[in-house]
Image (cartoon, grey):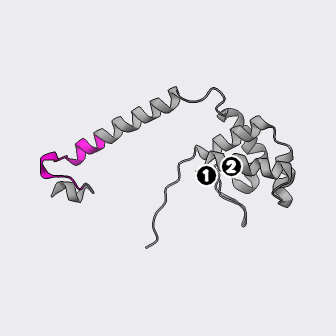
């Protein structure tokens, strides 16, 4: 019965208490974070540089935290790094057009694009179903 309330669908012989489940989740989370840090590619984005660049170029429209300040500006928090990187490159090259982004993106180096993509992708977003 406890398993079904906790959202598990396993036989009774595998009874887990909520406390044990939370401890297990913490262990898995810590192990996942450690693995991510140890396996991060050498060219991973520089988040300190990214924050400074976000404050200088992105904050007015997209917010330094990736939550848009202006109507019509995209929320960037939690967006996939690959998507952000490709869109910034497209704005910079002119294959994607926007009056503001086309100008801003032309000022970005490859490392700026990598860093900003990493920065905004690093934000965790929580989604709730509408009532």
Q: Secondary structure at mark 2?
A: helix
Residue 12 picture location, percent across and down:
13, 51
* Mark with earlier residue (2, 1): 1
Rate crowding at label 1 as few (under 14), some (14 to 19) or many (20 or more) other CA atoms within 10 Å: some
Query: Quick check: is 125 in the magenta stretch?
Result: no
Count residues near mark 2 (Cα–Cα under 10 Å), then give few for <14, some for 14-19, many for 20+.
Answer: some
Quarter of the C terminus within the rendering: bottom left
Q: Residue at x 79, y 51 (%)?
A: 90
Q: Is residue 38 left or right of residue 1?
A: right
Residue 107 image point, x, y percent: 85, 43
Asked if the residue under mark 1 is in contact with the one under mark 2, i.e. CB atoms within 8 Å, the reply is: yes
Q: Position of residue 70 (x, y in %)?
A: 73, 63
Mark 1: secondary structure: loop
The residue that disc 1 covers is 79
5 sits to left or right of 110: left
Looking at the figure, which quarter contains the N terminus?
bottom left
Residue drawn where x is 23% and y is 48% of the image: 18
Query: Where does label 2 land, which residue?
Result: 84
- Please report the bounds of the magenta region as a residue range: 9-23
Q: Nearer the viewer, residue 56 or 9?
A: 9
Is residue 75 depicted above or below 107 in this figure?
Answer: below
The part of the image, by quadrant, that contains residue 4 is: bottom left
Question: In the picture shown, does residue 85 fall above or below 38?
Answer: below
Q: Does the magenta-highlighted stretch encompass residue 11?
A: yes
């Amino acid at each position: 019965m406890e398993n079904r309330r906790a959202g598990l669908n396993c036989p009774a012989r595998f009874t887990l208490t909520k406390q044990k489940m939370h401890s297990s989740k913490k262990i898995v989370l810590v192990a996942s974070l450690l693995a991510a840090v140890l396996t991060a590619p050498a060219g991973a984005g520089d988040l300190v540089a990214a924050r400074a660049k976000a404050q200088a170029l992105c904050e007015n429209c997209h917010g330094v935290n990736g939550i848009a300040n202006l109507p019509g500006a995209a929320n960037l928090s939690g967006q996939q790094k690959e998507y952000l990187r490709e869109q910034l490159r497209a704005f910079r090259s002119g294959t994607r057009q926007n009056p503001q982004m086309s100008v801003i993106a032309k000022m970005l180096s490859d490392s700026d694009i990598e860093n900003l993509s990493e920065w905004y992708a690093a934000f965790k977003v929580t989604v709730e179903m509408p009532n």
